[in-house]
Amino acid sequence: MAQLEDENGKLRAELAKVSAGTKEFEILSGVNKDFVGYVKVQWGTEIGQLTPKEARGKALYLLEAAEEAESDARVLRTLKEVGLEIPVVFSIAGLIRADRDKS
């Protein structure tokens, strides 16, 4: 009976997995034999497992970093377009990032 429950748990875990990535970077949801959810992250040969709470935190961090990258690029392009020299543009970028890190 225990073996059947273990096999049933494995089957449920496999059925609960939802792919959300590519071969290079893959994120899968799953449920273990105790019906606890987890998130598996694989990048190449590196594999990790997170709790759903940890995964949400990392996802928010990734979204924030993506927004900052686009915002920084937009500001830097504008500063370059108005005629500031590249060293000055990157100096300002450093100041913006340092200010962002304070919050």
Image: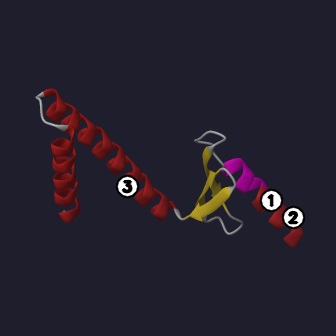
Write down the quadrant of residue 5 in the picture.
Answer: bottom right
Residue that protrudes farthest toward the top in the picture: 81
Mark 3 residue element: helix
Residue 57, x across and y down, in percent: 41, 60
Q: Which mark sits nearer the N-terminus, 2 or 3?
A: 2
- Residue at which label 2 appears: 4
Tell me the kind of residue under disc 2. Leu
Residue depicted at 36% across the width and 44% down the height: 66
In the image, residue 12 lies in the stretch drawn in magenta: yes
* Left or right side of 63 for 73: left
Quarter the N terminus occupies: bottom right
Q: Which mark sits nearer the N-terminus, 1 or 3?
A: 1
- Residue at which label 1 appears: 8
Tell me the kind of residue under disc 1. Asn
The Cα–Cα distance between marks 1 and 3, rounded to whole angstroms, is 35 Å
Near-viewer residue (7 or 60): 60
Query: Taking 21 as reference, is 29 above or below it?
Result: below
The Cα–Cα distance between marks 1 and 2, rounded to whole angstroms, is 6 Å
Question: Magenta stretch?
Answer: 11-16
**Residue 1 visible to the viewer:** no
Near-viewer residue (94 or 2): 94
Q: Which mark is residue 44?
A: none
Write down the quadrant of residue 69 in the picture.
Answer: top left
Near-viewer residue (57 or 3): 57
Residue 3, x across and y down, in percent: 88, 69
